[in-house]
Image (cartoon, rainbow, N blue to C red):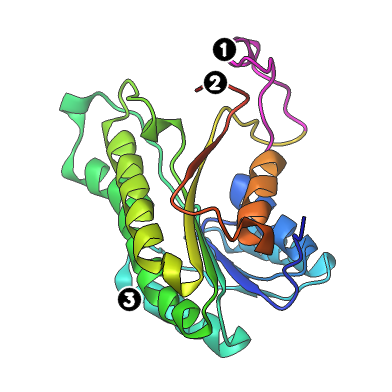
Amino acid sequence: MDLTLTGKTAFVSGSGQNIGRAIAVHLAQLGCNVVVNGATDARAAQDTAAQVEAAGSQALVAMGDVSRSETVAEIAEAALQRFGTVDILVNNAARRPHKPFLQMTDEDWHGVVNTALTAAFYTSRAFLPGMVDQGWGRIINFAGMKAIKGYFEGAPISAAKHGVWGLTKALSTEFASKGITANVISPGQIRKDAATEDDPARAARIPAGFMGRSEDIAAMAGFLAGPSARFVTGQMIAVNGGETT
């Protein structure tokens, strides 16, 4: 299996911590340069960039809210100026507030939808032209189990994640002939960090009997980003220990 990404560049939104950071570092270990992004915590993004560089790859920190079109345009310009191309797009940024539906404000709704869904549209529009020009690219979006099941007090999250799944299917169909794949990773119950122990109640709901780690999700992202996944597109891949089948 060829997982080598030497000479490639990835943009990973929300990569200052947790799953986003794990993906950025894993791609770097595979030889990929990484554009690290966060909305507010510049120190966390710098820490991720340091880990990318420690893995032997180059990093660029590009802070900004990817739910804003003009911000994405600025990030794309900086990334392309530094690396020439962005070959792998990972849309990981998300907001996950929980609130009873009848108490939700316009801001609650749009904050979630804009970060999870609209941002994926903006970043795809920004980086797809370069992928088309070179005849190669990877788009990896995130849906989570909220794109598979409805969740109590999570209406905007479920709606946004279903939208991401629809966007991904559309992109996979339109750009497959250009050498570009588009897939969704749907993470299950993931421990916040490696030092955190499993929540027994949550682990009991998982057939595997344990919660996943950010590195489990990063491993799937590394596969989908690599040459060996060239025939995998338009798919939602659940990484959840069998919690959904």
Contact, mark 2 vs mark 1 (Cβ under 8 Å)? yes
* Residue 75 on the magenta span: no
The answer to whether residue 200 is magenta is yes
Q: Position of residue 67 (x, y in %)?
A: 34, 61
The residue identified by callout 3 is 70
Cβ atoms at labels 1 and 3 below 8 Å apart? no
Q: In the image, which is nearer the foreground, mark 2 or mark 1?
A: 2
Q: Which residue: 36% across, 60% down? A: 173
Query: Does the image show residue 67?
Result: no
Q: Give the class, few, some or many, for how many residues have Cα within 10 Å of label 1's Cα (few <14, many ≥20).
A: some
| Residue 84 place in picture, x, y as percent | 58, 88
Mark 2 or mark 1: name the one nearer the start of the chain.
1
Residue hosting label 2:
243
Question: Which residue bears the numbered disc 1?
Answer: 205
For marks 3 and 2 on the same chain, the one whose residue lies earlier in the sequence:
3
Q: Which residues are magenta?
A: 195-213
Query: Mark 3: which secondary structure?
Result: helix
The amino acid pointed to by label 1 is Arg
- The kind of secondary structure element at disc 2 is loop
Per the model, the C-alpha gap separating discs 3 and 2 is 39 Å
Q: Is residue 78 above or below residue 26?
A: below
Q: Is residue 47 above or below residue 97?
A: below
